[in-house]
């Protein structure tokens, strides 16, 4: 992408939400293709990624972090456990509390998916320099961190 094409044309004046939706549509399609061999869906990938990043996690905390109600999370965890991607156990200090953790198989599955996701990033971000990719990654991470706040605003208005 040339400097001129990045700053001219209809995309230059489109609202950010329209641009994100446009890119998001393509990314979602590519993500689904990347996940297909594993049989996973996006929500399952998000749960597994959270567990890899944060380690063993109380089930209630996982529900809160994924913005899921308890019954939906149980269904998701049942699928992941049946596939051998996670393990669930009771908290030794409070037997009422369940702990969820990534299994070795789950970790290997995520590593395989990571390679496919990197190829998607490389294809979609081909016109961005490495420094621009880092900036985009940082901005998207900030938006993701703020998601519980802005997602609730959408629910409240809906």
Image: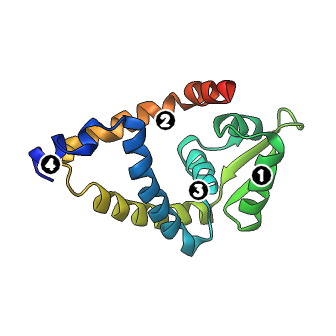
Q: Nearer the viewer, residue 139 or 7?
A: 7
Residue 42, numbered label? 3
Quickly name the residue at label 2.
144
Determine the secondary structure under disc 2.
helix
- Give whichever of discs 4 and 1 has the lower sequence position: 4
Q: Secondary structure at mark 3?
A: helix
| In contact (CB < 8 Å): disc 4 and disc 2 | no
Give the label on residue 108, or none. Answer: none
Residue 111 appears in view: no
Which residue occupies 16% across, 42% down? 8
Residue at the (84%, 46%) spot, across then down: 71
Classify mark 3: residues with Cα within 10 Å, few (<14), some (14-19) or many (20+). Answer: few
Camera-side residue: 47 or 93?
47
Taking the image as shown, residue 35 lies to the left or right of residue 93, namely left
Residue 80 x %, y %? 71, 60
Residue 135 as seen in the image, left or right of residue 118: left
Please give the residue where the numbered disc 1 appears in the rendered image.
88
């Amino acid at each position: 992408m040339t400097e001129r094409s990045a700053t001219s044309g209809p995309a230059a004046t489109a609202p950010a939400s329209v641009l994100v939706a446009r890119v998001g549509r393509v990314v979602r399609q590519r993500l689904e293709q990347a996940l297909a061999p594993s049989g996973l869906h996006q929500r399952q990938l998000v749960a597994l990624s959270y567990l890899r990043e944060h380690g063993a996690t109380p089930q209630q905390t996982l529900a809160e972090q994924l913005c899921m109600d308890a019954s939906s999370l149980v269904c998701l965890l049942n699928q992941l456990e049946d596939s051998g991607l996670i393990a669930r156990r009771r908290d030794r200090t409070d037997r009422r509390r369940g702990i969820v953790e990534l299994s070795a198989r789950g970790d290997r599955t995520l590593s395989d998916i990571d390679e496919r996701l990197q190829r998607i990033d490389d294809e979609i971000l081909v016109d961005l320099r490495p420094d621009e990719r880092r900036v985009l990654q940082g901005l998207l991470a900030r938006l993701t961190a703020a998601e519980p706040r802005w997602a609730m605003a959408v629910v409240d208005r809906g």
